[in-house]
Image: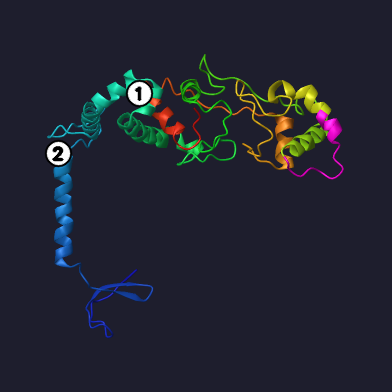
Amino acid sequence: MAQHKSEVDAITGVETTGHEWDGIRELNNPLPRWWLWLFYLTIIWSIGYWIVYPAWPLLTTYTQGAFGWNSRAALREDLAALHTKRAAMSDRIAASSLEQILGDQQMLDFARAQGRTAFADNCAPCHGAGGGGAKGYPNLNDDDWLWGGKLDDIALTIRHGIRSTDDKTRQGSMPAFGRDKLLSRQDIENVTDYVLAQAGLPTAQGADLAKGKKIFADNCVACHGDAGKGNREIGAPDLTDQIWLYGPDRNTIIEGLINGRGAVMPAWAPRLDDTTIKSLTVYVHTLGGGQK
């Protein structure tokens, strides 16, 4: 940086500061007064904020602030007020059966509103904001249910989960027929084509459906049934309805047969109170696929 005597810039008519960098001279354009005063005010405001509100960390705690206010306490107060406001209806929900909630319009409206919030907070990351599901996550809007779509079925699934660590969780998984060498690659392809044919989907050219049927009878009937209609007691899906959790294409089915299937849904009973679980059950049941 070169230091030069200040002079008036010929182009702008503004006096320079006398500083020059690589041939570029600095104009003496000070900040507007209003901007400087506003900046000073923000400094004064910040000092006041440090005094009034919790701000500075100490060795084992923090400054409490002159007002003694903090957002955690404010949140607790808001939640307590909300619980007080909802107490009467929450007590009715707690004392009523799922069928009674569904049959009472006032309780139903309350349960659906509370259930919608609980769903958005806990279920939407997997099942989608509207319950439409995704690959590997069931669609809760249709009437196709792995573990049953009645109120009690849905409540049981929510409370105890699927293949979770809960003692009462639902169990049942599809073996890894290929990985565990239970079936050869050719057997897997044959039974895949048989399953596709039963669902009315295209099969591989020259598929040996007779062999596929025999393999299905020996290895798959125990869970999916003779006609492939599934078994909700163990979460075995209906293979004939063209509703596929992981996809209906041949490669996806083959991959499932090779490596098995066994997704996990957490048990919500340890995390949600009984009233919230009831509301969530009713909300899911009324999405469009609930069964009587």
- The residue located at (54%, 38%) in the rendering is 142
Along the viewing direction, whichever of 225 and 212 lies nearer the viewer: 225
User: Residue 225 falls in which quadrant of the image?
Assistant: top right
- Give the CA separation, mark 1 to mark 2: 43 Å
Position in image of residue 63 (x %, y %): 19, 32
User: Residue 33 falls in which quadrant of the image?
Assistant: bottom left
Q: Is residue 173 left or right of residue 84?
A: right
Label 2 belongs to which residue?
51
Position in image of residue 183 (x %, y %): 81, 27
Q: Please indicate, yes or no, whether residue 273 appears anywhere in the rendered image.
A: no
From the viewer's perspective, is the residue at label 1 or at label 2 nearer?
1
Packing grade of label 2 (10 A; few <14, some 14-19, many >=20) is some
User: Residue type at mark 1?
Assistant: Thr
- The residue located at (80%, 36%) in the rendering is 189
- The residue located at (32%, 29%) in the rendering is 107
Q: Which residues are magenta?
A: 200-213
Q: Which mark is residue 275?
A: 1
